[in-house]
């Protein structure tokens, strides 16, 4: 069942598809649908299809994963665009994140597409720009897709259910000082001011902790200051990566942080808020009945832009994402197909 989809994954690996440059990978997906005589819809580098026996009034389930990849990590010892299989292991950039989930969900869509009396309608979407949370990815086609009752977002989770996901807000911070000669007692050193604020951020703990997602996490990940060795810098910029739980919107987290520090704080976006689904939801209960576990994910995905009930689940392992010599096991793809089918076969929405 999976052989042709593994070959499709090999074709995708062989084509560079960095975020914003996924057009060639999108064409591979579209050619698959053309060869299968399935009409598809497109917008920029996004492609989506609806099941053959669509019935108005039924619940609608979205199967979604992404076609873009990050740049190859510097430690690659293999050609990242050579999809080699060795001892049941498929290597290549995007094999795990998220080519494996992408083609496995496609196989699932094709499996159910032949059935006339499904209790729900299905949409399969191969979207772009997930790795950069781009506005021309899944977010750009949600209006065309229309209202949904459930979304299954394909990401490498070892086929366990991520029922909640931390939000993400990136803060650009600037500490302002006054320039002066380093040899004299002149100026106000912006680096020292930034250090004070960074220590405040490092030690601060948000009051509300999530049972599923844990605490809000803040990490200072970049810093820049100075023009030459003998000038006291009047400006020091740094970046804070903030991962929010469901108790704080990104707007609320920003307002708290802005009050904590003296530096100027500018959020890049508020759009990637924390998301989640109730343990009592039918898809989660169905997964539990199949022996699947659930957890809260510290990483963000396209799940963050969905206002509908959703879970994140897929073959592969998140720990391999964005690493050198990325790979996925053929057995993981086969197991993923079986579990996806079992999840949907017994689902009542």
Image: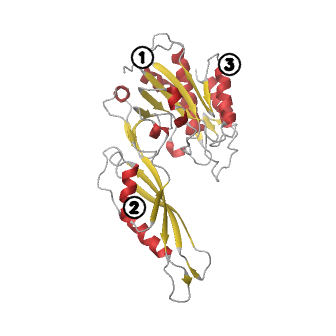
Residue 52 visible in the current orientation = yes
Q: In this view, does 242 lie to the left or right of 12?
A: left
Q: Is residue 32 left or right of residue 48?
A: right
Q: Nearer the viewer, residue 9 or 116?
A: 116
Front of the two marks 3 and 2: 2
Circle 1 residue: 58
Please tell me whether residue 167 is drawn above or below residue 196 in the rendered image.
above
Residue 149 percent location from the top left of the image: 41, 26
Q: Which of 262 and 299 is in front in this view?
A: 262
- Which circle's residue, 3 or 1, is located before the other in the chain? 3
Secondary structure of the residue carrying tag 1 is loop
Q: Residue at x 37, y 57 (%)?
A: 255
Front of the two marks 2 and 1: 2
Residue 332 percent location from the top left of the image: 53, 32
> Which residue, as the protein is rendered here, is positioned at the far bottom?
184
**Are there few (<14), some (14-19), or many (20+) residues within 10 Å of tag 3?**
few
**Are there few (<14), some (14-19), or many (20+) residues within 10 Å of tag 1?**
some
Circle 2 residue: 258
Front of the two marks 3 and 1: 1
Secondary structure of the residue carrying tag 2 is helix
Evaluate if marks 3 and 1 touch, with contact meaning CB atoms under 8 Å apart.
Answer: no
Q: Nearer the viewer, residue 43 or 315?
A: 43
Evaluate if marks 3 and 2 touch, with contact meaning CB atoms under 8 Å apart.
Answer: no
Please tell me whether residue 221 is drawn above or below residue 251 in the rendered image.
below
Residue 257 percent location from the top left of the image: 38, 60
Q: In this view, does 63 lie to the left or right of 293?
A: right
Secondary structure of the residue carrying tag 3 is helix
Circle 3 residue: 35
User: Which part of the image, by quadrant, shows the C terminus?
Assistant: top left
Q: Residue at x 49, y 10 (%)?
A: 116
- Which circle's residue, 2 or 1, is located before the other in the chain? 1
User: Which part of the image, by quadrant, shows the N terminus?
Assistant: top right
């Amino acid at each position: 069942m999976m052989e042709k989809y593994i070959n499709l994954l090999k074709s995708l690996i062989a084509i560079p598809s960095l975020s914003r440059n996924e057009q060639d990978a999108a064409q591979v997906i579209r050619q698959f649908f053309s060869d299968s005589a399935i009409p598809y819809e497109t917008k920029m580098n996004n492609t989506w299809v609806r099941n053959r026996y669509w019935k108005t009034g039924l619940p609608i389930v979205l199967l979604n994963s992404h076609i873009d990849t990050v740049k190859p990590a510097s430690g690659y010892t293999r050609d990242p665009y050579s999809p080699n299989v060795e001892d049941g292991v498929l290597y290549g950039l995007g094999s795990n994140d998220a080519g494996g989930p992408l083609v496995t969900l496609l196989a699932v869509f094709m499996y159910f597409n032949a059935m006339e009396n499904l209790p729900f309608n299905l949409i399969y979407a191969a979207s772009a720009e997930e790795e950069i949370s781009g506005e021309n990815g899944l977010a750009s086609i949600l209006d065309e897709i229309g209202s949904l009752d459930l979304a299954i977002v394909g990401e490498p989770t070892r086929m366990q259910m991520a029922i909640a996901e931390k939000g993400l807000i990136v803060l650009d911070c600037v500490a302002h000082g006054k320039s002066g000669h380093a040899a004299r007692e002149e100026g106000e050193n912006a680096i020292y001011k930034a250090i004070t604020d960074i220590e405040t951020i490092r030690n601060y703990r948000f009051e509300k902790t999530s049972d599923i997602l844990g605490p809000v996490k803040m990490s200072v990940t970049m810093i820049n200051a100075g023009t030459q060795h003998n000038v006291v810098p009047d400006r020091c910029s740094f970046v804070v990566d903030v991962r929010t739980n469901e108790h704080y919107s990104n707007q609320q987290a920003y307002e708290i942080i802005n009050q904590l520090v003296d530096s100027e704080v500018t959020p890049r976006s508020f759009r990637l808020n924390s998301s989640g689904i109730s343990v009592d939801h039918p898809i989660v209960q169905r997964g539990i009945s199949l022996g699947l576990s659930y957890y809260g994910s510290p990483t963000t995905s396209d799940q963050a832009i969905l206002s509908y009930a959703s879970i994140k689940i897929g073959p592969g392992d998140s720990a391999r994402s964005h690493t050198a010599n990325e790979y996925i096991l053929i057995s993981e793809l086969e197991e993923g197909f079986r579990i996806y089918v079992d999840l949907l076969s017994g689902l009542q929405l």
